[in-house]
Amino acid sequence: MILLSSIACSKKDEGVSPVGPEPGQDVVFLPVVVHVIHFGEAIGEGPNLSDERIQRQIGILNEDFRRKQGTRGFNNHPASEDSKIEFILAKQTTDGVSTNGINRINADQVTIPDLGYNQNHYAQYDYWPPDQFVNIWITPLPESAMCLALGEATGPDTELPGSEFLALPGPNDAEGILVNWMHFGESDIDCHAKYGRTLTHEMGHYLGLLHTWGNRDCESNDYCDDTPAVDEPVYGRTTFMGCNNETVLIENYMNYTEDDVMNMFTKDQIARMHYVLKNHTGRKALINSIGLSNP
């Protein structure tokens, strides 16, 4: 495995003149817009999730990324720490119009080309500038998709090793995150993914993290030296021995483990995300977005 911190250090400050918070040193805030795509349901019914549930999901995201004590996102593992990355529902649009960061769209009243189930399809309903907002689409999938389709995210194209294994957007693809409405926020659904960790996992991809098993290669893996190597997907809630007779970190957010088990990013994973925030043009611009301040 390649030690990420060494890679990050080798790239440090090369042509970078950050304005505002310094990733890796200060807490950085990223603005999100949640596009709620529904079919005319009343607010709080079906995919037209309530403001409270959406706000609670952003709260969960911050509990996880900030390793907040007294929450499911807290851990005392020596390989983990506070990521110093926090998310805020956008406060204004690029036009200076006040917003609560929740954008409701009745799909029955919008006609778009049928491009299938992909980023472009949902981005056609609405897509805010990706260098100013993290676009999140709550997708109105049928209940039969529960526990089968959770979420997906585009990753950043950087010089970090393994970036080619992320879902990199093509020339005409939208950047952002899709989350099945049934797995957005907390609920009582009959599924292991019901405590809001789908968004935590997908946000990890959006900021450059691979699954812990990477490309299923024991040698390079996810390019984070402090995640024990594993060459197969990690599911469930019971740990096991991975490569080199190391115990797999079952609780890592970048596994497919159950929501009530997930509760940690490692220090190298955090360093990788901060490298992206310093060196990827679009992700770096988020730190100084107009969406972070009141109009």
Image: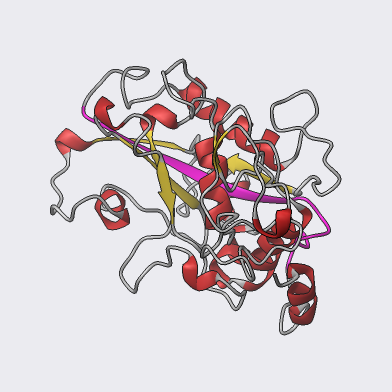
Query: Which stretch is magenta?
Result: 19-39
Q: Quadrant of residue 103?
A: top left
Q: Residue 6: x, y in percent?
A: 79, 74
Q: Quadrant of residue 22?
A: bottom right
**At x 62% / y 50%, what residue is drawn?**
30
The reply, left or right, for residue 20 in relation to residue 132 is: right
Q: Is residue 29 magenta?
A: yes
Q: Is residue 142 magenta?
A: no
Figure check: 118 above or below 278? above
The reply, left or right, for residue 72 in relation to residue 107 is: right
Figure check: 59 above or below 215? above
**At x 41% / y 49%, what residue is drawn?**
152
Q: 16 and 68: which one is in front?
A: 68
Q: 149 and 214: which one is in front?
A: 214
Q: 178 and 197: which one is in front?
A: 197
Q: Residue 278: x, y in percent?
A: 69, 69
Figure check: 130 above or below 135? below
**At x 57% / y 45%, what residue is drawn?**
255
The reply to whether residue 107 is in sight is: yes
Q: Residue 260: x, y in percent?
A: 61, 27
The reply to whether residue 91 is in sight is: no
Q: Residue 217: x, y in percent?
A: 56, 67
| Colouring rule applied to residues | secondary structure
**At x 24% / y 29%, what residue is drawn?**
142
Q: Residue farthest to the bottom?
A: 15
**Which quarter shows the C terminus?**
top right
